[in-house]
Amino acid sequence: MTGLHTPVLLNEVLDWLQIKPDGTYVDATTGTGGHAVEIARRLRGGGLLVAIDRDAQALEIARGRLEEFGERVTLVYDNFSHIAEIAERLRIQSVDGIVADLGVSSLQLDSIERGFSFRGAGPLDMRMDTGAADKAAEIVNRWPERELANLLYHYGEERDSRRIARNIVRSRPIRDTEHLATVVAGAQKRGRQKLHPATKTFLALRIAVNRELEELEQFLDRAPATISSGGRMVVLSYHSLEDRRVKQAFRRLAQQGVLKVLTKKVIEPGAAELAANPRSRSAKMRVAERRAPANGTRDMREAS
Ligand SMILES: C[S@@+](CC[C@H](N)C(=O)[O-])C[C@H]1O[C@@H](n2cnc3c(N)ncnc32)[C@H](O)[C@@H]1O
């Protein structure tokens, strides 16, 4: 099937989740279902996988792949920051594990019409949730130069942010992603670069359009409370802004006695995975375990 995303660190995710066949798990970023299918395959009887994504197109593909597991899988079209509300809606008291594989899927990246890629003339869109209001065009063609430069600097860690923002504003209206990539490349000093010159600009726009960092922070704040003691939280991130937030949130929650960090060192793909799936190259995985509440009260689920 085209558009399927190759799941990153699949064996590691499955191992660290320590899946119990009758447990309840959440895939917060189901995408086209790479991790979800393998989690669902390990469930039996009373086991349940809640498969969340805010991309309806991806979720439809996942639905087809997960159909064989019947009632063991519940698909949810929503933002993962709403994890507590989702659990409540589904009458789930607590879960045994959560995986969040952040960022974009191959389906999103490779569909030129979604506007995530600079390798083609796509619309200035970049919304993961195509029902959301603002597209990249709003930022690219309307934001003041200074705000645009700040965005590229903070979210893209782009050192040429001012020159790029100036070039974008002068070239308005920017027609499509190919036009944008040309304008961005034209603003950069020529040098030896490993990345495509538009990589950081596209990353910054994508983060802003989808409010990725705000979503992540809310998720990291809320998710631990939905996990039963001993349950695990596995997070894969793909750039430093994300990984820093995961690391800091885990550290803070560990100090508060809510989580125990299990990965003292971040887990990254090995040589074989990198060779087979170059898109896994920036992946960083961190795992934490929910600790029993300090006051001696047990989770609702355990007490019942
Ligand atoms: C890297 S892909 C996941 C791939 C999946 N693990 C697999 O192996 O097929 C990330 C997915 O997360 C989704 N996503 C990103 N932010 C989200 C959010 N705040 N809420 C729900 N889904 C989100 C994206 O739409 C995308 O489908």
Image (tube, rainbow, N blue to C red):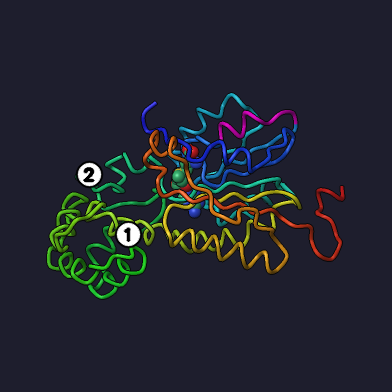
Give me the residue at 20% from left, 51% from top: 176
Q: Secondary structure at mark 2?
A: loop
Q: Is 186 on the left-hand or right-hand side of 269?
A: left
The circle drawn on residue 119 is: 2
Residue 9 is covered by the magenta coloring = no
- The CA span between labels 1 and 2 is 16 Å
Label 1 with label 2: CB-CB less than 8 Å: no
Question: Can you give x and y, in whole percent of width and height, for residue 212 in the image?
Answer: 44, 58
Viewport quadrant of the N terminus: top left
Asked whether residue 55 appears in the rendered view, the answer is: no
Question: Can you give x and y, in whole percent of width and height, for residue 17 in the image?
Answer: 65, 42
Q: Is 21 on the left-hand or right-hand side of 138?
A: right
Magenta stretch in the rendered image = 36-45
Decide if ligand 1 comes within 8 Å of the CB at mark 1.
no
Name the amino acid type tagged 2.
Arg
Please count the marks in the image: 2
Q: Quadrant of residue 67?
A: top right
Q: Quadrant of residue 11?
A: top right
Q: Is 173 on the left-hand or right-hand side of 296?
A: left
Asked whether residue 285 appears in the rendered view, the answer is: yes
Give me the residue at 67% from left, 49% from top: 232
Which residue, as the protein is rendered here, is positioned at the far top? 68
Residue named by callout 1? 205
Q: Main secondary structure of the magenta part?
A: helix
Name the amino acid type tagged 1.
Leu
**Within-10-Å neighbours for mark 1: few <14, some 14–19, many 20+:** many
**Within-10-Å neighbours for mark 2: few <14, some 14–19, many 20+:** some
Give me the residue at 63% from left, 27% from top: 70
Of label 1 and label 2, which has the lower sequence position?
Answer: 2
Give me the residue at 46% from left, 32% from top: 61
Q: Is 34 on the left-hand or right-hand side of 196?
A: right
Q: Secondary structure at mark 1?
A: helix
